[in-house]
Structure formats: structure tokens, C-alpha cells
Amino acid sequence: MPGLASRFEKAAAMEDITLRPLIVAKIRDSRLPGTTPPHVWGGPGHGAACSACEDTISKRQREIEAVLVGGTTFMFHVHCFQLWDEEREAVQDAEPRTVVTARKRGESTCGCPPAPQPTG
Ligand SMILES: [Zn+2]
């Protein structure tokens, strides 16, 4: 059914236009986590509100439950979770990172000449 499929794709793309900026704003405001959740489960919805779009995840839909370190739980529609997952990485990449200069190995840090090698 190519007609139905393309109509669904179009609807999903329209959703992204409004959802994506909302999810990005929430990540920046820390309303959504910007870190990778260590535990993620999927299952049938049970009427919880989606952490991304704030719509109810109905029993006919599937929900994704993301549990962070410390036990904070976020619920998502499958599609919202995918968008969050993508944007989380994009936001992390855009954040200025602390520049870590790797200390060169084997170089003297005190400026002393190398110790004489024992002979014999
Ligand atoms: Zn949602």
C-alpha cells in the first residue's frame, strides 16, 4: 500500500517539524535528560503523559520508558523517543566541551636532564 505508507510518512514529517524544536528546548532546559539512559524498556502504554510531547500515551500505543541513574523515569511515545535520542546527541555535540589536553608520555615535566644510565 504505497499510498498509505507515504501518507503516514508525511504525517510523521509534519509532526517532527513541531516536535523536534520542543524536544531540543526541553533538553536545553533540562526538562529532558541530555544523557544516555542506562535502562530503556518498551511496552504497551498505560495512560501516562509523554515526557516529550506531553500527550497521553494510550493503551493502543507503545510506550518507551527511560530510567536514568538515580531512578528518574521518563515516558515517551516510540516516535518521541526516537526524536529525543537523535536530538540528545545533536545537543551534546553542540555544547562546548572542556578541552582536555593529553599529557605527552615520556616527557620530563620538571626540565631535569635525563638520569644517567648505569654502565657495566
Ligand atoms: Zn510523545
Image (spheres, helix red, strand yellow):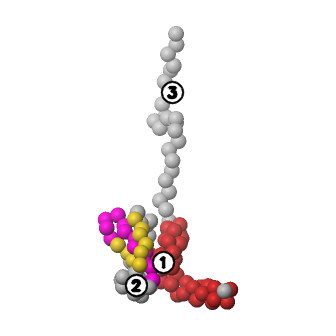
Name the element at disc 2: loop
Mark nearer the N terminus (1 vs 2): 2
Circles 1 and 2: CB atoms closer than 8 Å: no
Give the residue at the far front of this rendering: 1
Toward which corner of the image does residue 39 lie, by quadrant? Answer: bottom left
Mark 3 within 8 Å of ligand 1, using the beta carbon: no
Name the quadrant of the N terminus: bottom right
In front: 34, or 79? 79
Query: Which kind of residue does numbered mark 3 sit on?
Result: Pro
* Residue 79 x/y as whole percent: 51, 79
Residue type beneath disc 2: Lys
Res 29 visible: no
Query: Is 71 colored magenta in this rendering?
Result: yes
Q: Are marks 3 and 1 in contact (CB under 8 Å)?
A: no
Relative vertical location of residue 36 with respect to residue 61 in this rendering, above or below? above
Label 2 crowd (10 A; few <14 / some 14-19 / many >=20): few
Query: At 63% from the left edge and 89% from the top edge, which residue is drawn?
Result: 4
Which of the pair 91/32 is nearer the observer? 32
Which residue is the extreme one toward the left? Answer: 70
Q: Which dot, 3 or 1, sits closer to the camera? A: 1
Determine which residue is flagged by label 3: 114
Q: Name the residue that disc number 1 marks.
A: 78
Residue beneath disc 2: 59
N-terminal of the two: label 2 or label 3? 2
Q: Residue at x 47, y 83 (%)?
A: 22
Are discs 2 and 3 less than 8 Å apart at CB? no
Sort mark 1 into few (<14), some (14-19) or many (20+) by Cα contacts within 10 Å.
some
**Label placed on residue 19:** none
C-alpha span from label 2 to label 3: 72 Å
Label 3 and label 1: CA atoms lie apart by 61 Å
Range of the magenta residues?
A: 61-72
